[in-house]
Image (cartoon, rainbow, N blue to C red):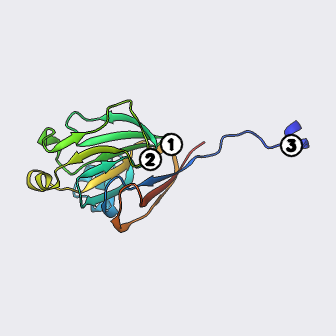
Amino acid sequence: MFKKLFGMKETTETPTEEVIFAPLSGKVTELSEVPDPTFSQKMMGDGLAIVPTEGEVVSPVDGEIIQFFHTKHAIGIRSQSGAEILIHVGLETVSMNGEGFEGHVREGDKVKAGDKLITFDLNLINEKAASTITPIVITNGEKVESLEKKLSEQAIKAQTEILHLKTKA
């Protein structure tokens, strides 16, 4: 009441806005283009996918590594706004058992946008897996108020904005 009388602002939390940069260089496309129903039907969450042109994944945000699969084909990051981002390199790459993948971080590591997370052999994935297309999914969508997607024919890792989100207060 005093705050309203004296023109002081209420100290309520406002939704946090965040930019998510491309974690890989390549063509940014809709999840519906991913030839796997788990991703195309958004069973894991909403987001985008990138058809990579080189074998390096960087952090799309400042945050913390919350999950890193032992096969090094997928990684989860919690951003500063609380969004949980899954980057899944290729399709059916889990069957490669880590062959052609190298991890550069561990669970619990703090990362900055642009930090190297995973390097991988693009040719080997082309040869041994179903596809190189890499879904980037917000797995805790219930915390997201809005998600704006930005498609691009040629995204540059750590530079091209692919998602703009607001998390709920």
Is residue 37 left or right of 96 when viewed as pictured? right
Whole-percent x, y for residue 164 in the image: 49, 56
Classify 25 as above or below 117.
Answer: below
Q: Earlier in the sequence, mark 3 or mark 2?
A: 3
**Going by the picture, which residue comes out furthest to the left?**
127
Q: Mark 2 points at which residue?
A: 61
Image quadrant holding the N terminus, namely top right
Amino acid marked by disc 3: Lys
Q: For residue 86, what is the image quadrant? A: top left
Residue 115 in sight from this viewpoint: yes
Distance from disc 3 to disc 2, alpha carbons, whole Å, reads 37 Å
Judging depth in this view, the residue of 121 and 87 nearest the camera is: 121
User: Residue 137 location, x and y as percent?
Assistant: 36, 49
Q: Residue furthest right?
A: 5
Decide: few, some or many residues near mark 2? Use Cα within 10 Å; few <14, some 14-19, many ≥20.
many
- Among numbered discs 1 and 3, the one appearing first in the sequence: 3
Q: How far apart are marks 1 and 2 (CA)?
A: 17 Å
Disc 1 marks a residue whose amino acid type is Lys
Residue at x-position 26% and y-position 60% = 51
Q: Identify the element where label 3 is drawn.
A: helix
Q: Name the residue under label 1.
A: 143
Residue at mark 1 to residue at mark 3: CA–CA distance: 29 Å
The mark found on residue 165 in the picture is none
144 or 157: which is nearer to us? 157
The quadrant of the rendering that contains the C terminus is top right
The residue to which callout 3 is attached is: 4
Rendered location of residue 124, percent (x, y): 11, 52
